[in-house]
């Protein structure tokens, strides 16, 4: 029996290059390795903790589903579904709420950061780690791929599993963290911030047209001096562009830097834009086909939800019996 790995992605509109290189690429690689039983879901419940438009939410969810399928998430190789379509996630989260302390949740770094950024301090945001624990433990995951900024959430998941097992009897695994090898791509207009849809001028969306890509790369900030060298500390802007160039061409950064020695930023940026366009073309062609097949997407999601639901129902049935519910 293959070890189980669970991963989710919050829907917030179309994906960008930072999403792909930072997380999705690793998810696809894990799936294609065929070493794991993969559960990949769109975390729509988690996205409700932020301000949103109900009219836009449905489209945001659909955009992420189409993007993930176009990037290579394969419903034949992964159990692919939407979180809210498997209600056992929320049911298990409510049970877990009773074995995790308020103090533990108050100490979550991401919760504090979101509040400082001006996000409403709602109960959903506060309990976010508990639902995340349920997302993972409902499938009795062995591994969870996350970035360093999410490692605290996995630690609390492990603690919840440990507390539950100690209180009610061995039921859950304590999933291990697989730290993401993904890159932290920076915004084109501010190399001190992560690439984000909240900074649209500095964000390369995977669905951007060639004209938009050329314009965004042309106007991307650069550092003082004209040297094209990889030096993240002293030249973060050009180093970010070199990283992107390396990823879309599969060439070593140092070789790229050597190629553009004494050639200046103009030629480098022009070539970078064209290479990004070439890199994204297969994805964009696949995306057109998926976008034109909404019924097939619904069918694939229904199959994934059914597979996930069977496992989730069995886990919840076991949990309810263990804790004394009828």
Image (spheres, rainbow, N blue to C red):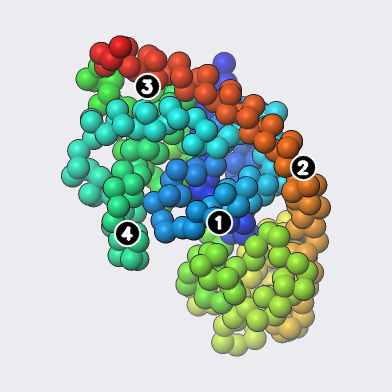
- Work out whether residue 23 can be spotted: no
The number of callouts visible is 4
Q: Which residue is mark 4?
A: 120
Compare marks 2 and 4 and give the one earlier in the sequence.
4
Residue at image coords 34%, 42%: 129
- Measured as percent of width and height from the top left, residue 87 is found at 45, 30
User: Few, some or many C-alpha atoms within 10 Å of disc 2 (few <14, some 14-19, many ≥20)?
Assistant: few
- Measured as percent of width and height from the top left, residue 268 is found at 73, 77
Q: Which mark is residue 293?
A: 2
Distance, label 2 to label 1, CA atoms, is 20 Å
Distance, label 2 to label 3, CA atoms, is 39 Å
Q: Secondary structure at mark 2?
A: loop
Distance, label 4 to label 1, CA atoms, is 19 Å
Distance, label 2 to label 4, CA atoms, is 37 Å
- Measured as percent of width and height from the top left, residue 71 is found at 70, 47
Q: Which residue is mark 3?
A: 172
Distance, label 1 to label 3, CA atoms, is 37 Å
Of labels 4 and 1, the one closer to you: 1
**Which quadrant would residue 65 be assigned to in this image?**
top right
Q: Secondary structure at mark 1?
A: helix
Compare marks 2 and 1 and give the one earlier in the sequence.
1
Q: Which residue is mark 1?
A: 56
Q: Secondary structure at mark 3?
A: loop
Q: Secondary structure at mark 4?
A: loop
What quarter of the picture does the N terminus occupy?
top right
Q: Nearer the viewer, residue 223 or 294?
A: 294
Of labels 3 and 4, the one closer to you: 4
Compare marks 1 and 3 and give the one earlier in the sequence.
1
- Measured as percent of width and height from the top left, residue 163 is found at 25, 26
């Amino acid at each position: 029996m293959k070890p189980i790995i669970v991963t989710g992605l919050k829907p917030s509109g179309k994906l960008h290059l930072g999403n792909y290189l930072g997380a999705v690429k690793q998810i696809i690689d894990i799936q294609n390795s065929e070493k794991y039983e993969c559960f990949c879901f769109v975390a729509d419940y988690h996205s409700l903790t932020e301000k949103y438009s109900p009219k836009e939410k449905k489209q945001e969810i659909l955009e992420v589903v189409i993007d993930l399928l176009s990037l290579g998430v394969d419903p034949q190789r992964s159990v692919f579904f939407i979180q809210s379509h498997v209600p056992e996630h929320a049911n298990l989260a409510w049970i877990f709420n009773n074995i995790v302390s308020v103090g533990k949740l108050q100490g979550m770094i991401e919760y504090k950061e979101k509040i400082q950024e001006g996000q409403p301090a709602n109960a959903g945001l506060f309990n976010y780690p508990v639902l995340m624990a349920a997302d993972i433990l409902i499938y009795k995951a062995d591994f969870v791929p996350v970035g360093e900024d999410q490692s605290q959430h996995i630690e609390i998941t492990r603690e919840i599993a440990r507390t539950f097992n100690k209180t009610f009897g061995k039921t859950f695994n304590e999933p291990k963290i697989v730290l993401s090898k993904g890159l932290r791509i920076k915004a084109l207009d501010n190399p001190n911030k992560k690439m984000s849809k909240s900074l649209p001028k500095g964000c390369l969306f995977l669905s951007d047209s060639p004209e938009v890509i050329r314009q965004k790369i042309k106007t991307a900030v650069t550092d003082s001096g004209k040297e094209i060298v990889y030096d993240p500390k002293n030249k973060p802007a050009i180093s970010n562009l070199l990283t992107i160039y390396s990823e879309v061409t599969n060439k070593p950064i140092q070789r790229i830097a050597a190629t553009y020695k004494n050639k200046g930023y103009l030629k480098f940026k022009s070539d970078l834009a064209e290479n990004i366009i070439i890199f994204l073309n297969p994805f964009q062609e696949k995306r057109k086909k998926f976008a034109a097949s909404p019924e097939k997407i619904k069918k694939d999601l229904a199959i994934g939800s059914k597979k996930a639901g069977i496992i989730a129902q069995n886990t919840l049935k076991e949990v309810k019996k263990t804790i004394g519910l009828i």
